[in-house]
Image: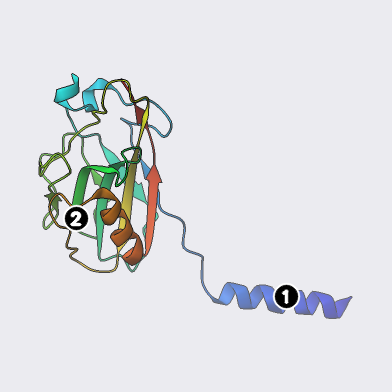
Amino acid sequence: MKLVAVLFGLIVGLVGAKGPAHAAMVLTSPDVKNGRAIALTYVHAQCGGQNISPEVSWSGAPAGAKSFALTVIDLDVKPDQFSHWIVVDLPPATTSVPRGAAGLPLPGKVVANNFGEAAYGGPCPPKGSGAHHYQFTIWALPNATTAVAPDEKARAVREALGKIAIDKASFTPTYGR
């Protein structure tokens, strides 16, 4: 019995010697919630909304993150999805983007979305297409800068960021008309 206790103690000690495990990243918003309908405030003006970007904040980023990218992608547009907001090069000390996102911390910048706008473009699915799912994702990246071509296909943006990200967090609200 003593041998088992000693071995258990050694194993626990060795596991603990690696240091604390990295806490998973978490992305939240007081304005839009996972699985809930997006309010008209955040819907594109073409669909009767105010087209104001929601506030988002994140925590639990890995120490190795040199920058962040933020994306909002409509997962229901076939075949390549649809980007509504792409923000890249957010500095590693950044933990939020304010509602209305008028000023981003430099060198952060907005890349043209699939509306062709270098701005937030709120939900605006075709009438009668049902509820669409808008995936908000924060990507922790190993480089200070990330190249994303303007109006790049949303699926290609997600795949490229997925290949280089060291961590990410998402939530997915909905909107339909």
Image quadrant of residue 45?
Answer: top left
- Pointer 2: what residue? 88
Q: CA distance from mark 1 to mark 2?
A: 46 Å
Which residue appears farthest toward the front when viewing the image?
79
* 68 to 110, vertically: above or below: below
**Residue nearest the viewer, comparing 78 with 11:** 78
* 133 to 145, vertically: above or below: above
* Location of residue 51 in the rendering, given as x and y in whole percent from the top left corner: 17, 28
Secondary element type, mark 2: strand
- Looking at the image, is mark 1 or mark 2 earlier in the sequence? 1
**Residue nearest the viewer, comparing 149 with 173:** 149
Please indicate whether residue 164 sits to the left or right of residue 99 in the image. right
- Pointer 1: what residue? 9
Mark 1 residue type? Gly
Mark 2 residue type? Val
Residue 173 appears in view? yes
